[in-house]
Amino acid sequence: MTLLHRRALLGAAALLPLAPALRPGTALAQPGATTSWPSRPVRFVVPFAPAGTTDIAARILATRLQQRLGQPFPVENRGGAGGNIGSDVVAKADPDGYTILMQTVSSGAINYELYGKEMPYKPQDLAAVGLLIKVPNVIFVTPSLPVKTLAELVALAKKKPGELNHGSSGAGTSLHMTGELLKMEAGIQMTHVPFRGAGPMLAEIMAGRVEVGVDNLPSAIGHIRDGRLRPLAVTTATRSPALPDVPTTAEAGFPGVEATGWFGVQAPAKTPRPIIEKLGAEIDAVVKEPETWAKLADLGGMKPGLTPDGGTTPAAFEAFVQAEVKKWAEVVRRSGAKVD
């Protein structure tokens, strides 16, 4: 038997156990197309501008994937429409494993209900690959506001319905929706003030012109540590090691206010399943690397992207995304949130 024949047989055998896992309508790829993947650079689309949390996380992952798989994963920033433009590029790309997406809670869950009929892609247009990181959100106030706990903020808001303002980095963002979730669960009224980004929002709260804010912990933690923002609670199930003295929303008396910023990889829906599984396994390996997490920890508050069942496999990430889509659709509907 020639070396060429032996390689072909081995490639076919490797695909057989994976055949039942193929999505309906997805043809089994030729062995060479999957066992040799990647044989050229893989375009890694980030649907937001450079230098944000999404971009930073994608570049850290891209570096490790290149080192592990031997091909470049060039990051391409395609921002706009709350992440919809870049996500749509991937949803409509050739499903050959050479275009992937760094997805977020906004463009991967909230936007489906928020944009409604204007949404250019559907959840079924993208295949889950792996969940990389989770980021706590933090609820905080300007230091001049006479509250030190979340319960005190709720009590003050009830005394002054609609008088307190809560800022976010933009209408429809996960931070806006976290504020809406707090209002719904606590039965309070506050006026939402959307900004074009976290920077302007934080500046107004530190100046005392907006009383309450919600932000991803990495971008707010420096201002919290220097005393220019007063944290009331983190919105994750457990406390953040970056702010160990700050209670969770559940500990503060509002267990329904749980919200996590998350970042994971998706691909076009018809990407061959063996490629999805191979890339998912690589992401799972990266998630478990202490060296990688040391880099992410420097950003503040980052946690490994483990789903509730403790995994970051394609199947686990798919179930996680479906739950997030359902959860945030209800919040959007109940809050009446609109796009800018």
Image: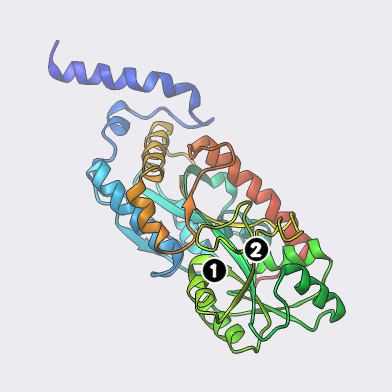
The front one of 27 and 73 is 73
Is residue 23 visible in the rendered structure shown here? Answer: yes
Against 301, residue 325 (above or below) is above
Around disc 2, counting alpha carbons within 10 Å, would you say few (fewer than 14), some (14 to 19), or many (20 or more)?
Answer: some
Q: Position of residue 161 (x, y in %)?
A: 84, 79
Residue closer to the observer: 19 or 186: 186
Q: Residue at x 60, y 66 (%)?
A: 138
Residue 336 showing in the rendered view: no
Amino acid marked by disc 2: Tyr
Residue 309 locus on image (x, y percent): 58, 36
Disc 2 to disc 1, how far (Cα)?
10 Å
242, above or below 95, in the image? below
**Label 2: which residue?**
115
Label number found at residue 81: 1
Task: Tell me the SS state at disc 2.
Answer: helix
Give x and y (percent) for residue 176.
65, 69
